[in-house]
Structure formats: C-alpha cells, structure tokens
Amino acid sequence: MPRQPRRRSYDQHCAAARALDLVGDRWTLLVVRELLAGPRRYTDLHADLPGVSTDMLAGRLKDMEGAELVTRRRLPPPASASVYELTPRGRDLLPVLRALAAWGAPDLGEPTPTDAVRAHWYAIPLLGPLTELGPGVVQVSLDEGEFYVRIGGGDGAVEYGDGAADGPDALLRTDAATCRALAEGELTLAAAVEAGRAVVTSGATSAPNPSPRA
C-alpha cells in the first residue's frame, strides 16, 4: 500500500491552524496518547492502535519526528531494540488530550461489539477524578488490564503509564463502566467507593514498571 501523502499546511496565520498542521492528521493524537503512557516499540504501537495500517503508522511517526514531537532511541542490551518516545513538546499535548477526552466522554457509551478496548485508554479521563486521592502513584486494575497514574504534589502535575507500577501508594480496583461514570462526572471517586463500585487500598508490593513490550 502506498504511503499516505502528508497533508499540506492550512497556510493560515492562526495558532489553531498551525497546531492542526502538526497534529491534525488522522492517528497523530492517538499515537501521542500511546506514547504518553511510556516509550513504545513500533510493534507495541501497532498492536495498541487497532485499525492503523503499517504504512500509515510509519508515515505518522516519521512526520512526528520531523515536527520534533517524537524521538527514537536504541535500548541498551539485552533489549537491543528501538523505541519511540515523546519530546517535551510532544508531552505538552497531554492537556489537549484531556480536554478532548472530557468533551467526548458524554458520547462514549457502552463499547460496541467492534470496539477495541485497552485499559490504559481510561487513564486520561481518570486523571481528574483520581486527584481525590492526593499526591502519589495510583495503580488501577480493570478486567481489561492495569495502568497507573502519578499525581504530583504542589504543582498538581499528572501523568500515566501502562502496566503495573513499582511500589504504588494506592491500589484502585474498579470496572470500565465505573471509569466511564467517573469520566462523565456522574460519580465522584468517593461515591464510587461508597457504592461498592470501586475499592481503594493502600499500596503493596507489585510488579515493577514493565519495559517496553516486544
């Protein structure tokens, strides 16, 4: 399949148009969503972006490298593999994705039979609700998998990662339906716990953060 041509600039002297020149292409912001969870091998990205063709993904990554949103580096032995990761400018897109997730949450609804689901896709909508637990690392366990959220102290900074955390401060067990209710503002975390829809316990020894997956 031939590579999709890169879209031309809007040629508008407007900050929003300039931003869309860089991240407005199909799949670009979803690549950012994946890389916000940590460095990824190409195969990891392709596995967690169901529906993207290999040529499209390769083209998007090349464009994102050119725009200095993404860098590629070689892991030391014994891994000896290349991973993609966000630059600081790429990571600055987290608030953009949080705003998009908040705007789209009311339309999320129940998954359809054809919808792919990954646990860490719920991380961005939960960044706000999980601040109720205060600063620290929260490991979230769903039937679909695990992810963790790191909530800063005085600066209120938040970030997330895929998989299990190393020595989390709190463990949250819930389900996807409760995640959606929290994201849509139908529930607070405290109300979800009181209703028995979520269980929060203190941190315990857990598996260390996984290395980028093969």
Image: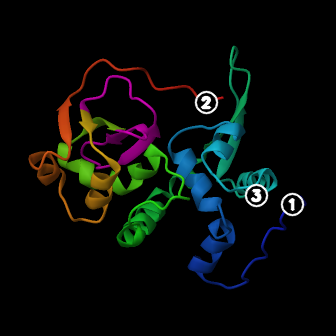
How many neighbours does mark 2 have within 10 angstroms: few (below 14), some (14-19), or many (20 or more)? few
- Vertical order, 68 against 214 (above or below): below
Circles 1 and 2 in contact, beta carbons < 8 Å? no
Display coloring: rainbow
Q: Residues within 10 Å of mark 1 (few under 14, many from 20)?
A: few
- Alpha carbon distance from label 1 to label 2: 26 Å
Label 3 – label 2 distance at C-alpha:
23 Å
Q: Which residue is mark 3?
A: 63
Task: Specify the segment rendered in magenta.
Answer: 142-170
Q: Which tag, 1 or 3, sits closer to the chain's start?
A: 1
| Residue 26: image location, x then y, percent | 67, 67
For this rendering, which residue is in front, 86 or 138?
138
Query: Mark 1, mark 3: which one is toward the viewer?
Result: 1
Q: Which residue is mark 2?
A: 213
Q: Between disc 3 and disc 2, whose residue precedes?
A: 3
* Mark in the foreground, 3 or 2: 2
Helix, strand or loop at label 3? It is helix
State the quadrant of the C terminus: top right
What label does residue 3 carry, if any? 1
- In the rendered image, the residue lying farthest to the front is 113
The amino acid sitting under disc 1 is Arg
Residue 207 percent location from the top left of the image: 40, 20
Mark 2: which amino acid? Arg
The residue under the point 51% across, 47% down is 36
- Near-viewer residue (142 or 16): 142
